[in-house]
Amino acid sequence: MTQRARLHPHVTTVATDDGLVLLDERGGRYWQLNTTAAAILEHLARGADPRTAAEHLVSRYGIGRERAESDVRIFLERLRSAGLLFTAPDDRPAG
């Protein structure tokens, strides 16, 4: 079974013209994500793994694969350390 990143249930999201706002309802703290970070999170929410999200950055912004993978990894680490994201088993059927 694969793992995928998910936002905690206590995190609310709102799309904006400039990206996405996350609200941690436990403490009322807001996080403003730019369009690039919002795209990463959107790919992950649809079930993509971090490598696939990085490939999107490579194709959309023309950056190198190493940088894209590093950017995705750092972004996910920051969300995890803020208590907004966790890794859970992917409960979608294979195929």
Image: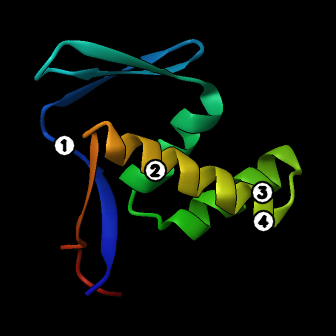
Residue 66: which disc?
Answer: 4
State if disc 2 and disc 4 touch (CB < 8 Å): no
Q: What is the C-alpha distance between the residues marked 1 and 2?
A: 13 Å
Question: If you read the primary sequence from the N terminus, does the residue marked by circle 1 or circle 3 appear first?
Answer: 1
Q: Amino acid at mark 2?
A: Leu
The local secondary structure at tag 4 comes to helix
Instruction: Quarter of the image for the C terminus: give it.
Output: bottom left
Residue under label 2, please give it.
76
The local secondary structure at tag 3 comes to helix
Question: If you read the primary sequence from the N terminus, does the residue marked by circle 3 or circle 2 appear first?
Answer: 3
- Is 83 displayed left or right of 38 in the figure? left
Q: What is the C-alpha distance between the residues marked 1 and 3?
A: 27 Å
Q: What is the C-alpha distance between the residues marked 4 and 2?
A: 15 Å
Q: Position of residue 37 (x, y in %)?
A: 57, 36
Q: Residues within 10 Å of mark 4 (few under 14, many from 20)?
A: few
Q: Position of residue 78 (x, y in %)?
A: 44, 42
Nearer to us of marks 1 and 2 is 2
Q: Position of residue 63 (x, y in %)?
A: 86, 52
- Is 72 displayed left or right of 92 in the figure? right
Residue under label 3, please give it.
67
Asked whether 72 or 19 is in front, the reply is 72
Instruction: Quarter of the image for the N terminus: give it.
Output: bottom left
Residue under label 1, please give it.
8
Question: If you read the primary sequence from the N terminus, does the residue marked by circle 4 or circle 2 appear first?
Answer: 4
Q: Amino acid at mark 3?
A: Arg
Q: Position of residue 55 (x, y in %)?
A: 70, 63
The local secondary structure at tag 1 comes to loop
Q: Amino acid at mark 1?
A: His
Residue 32 vs 88, above or below: the answer is above
Question: If you read the primary sequence from the N terminus, does the residue marked by circle 1 or circle 2 appear first?
Answer: 1
Q: What is the C-alpha distance between the residues marked 3 and 2?
A: 14 Å
Specify the color scheme.
rainbow
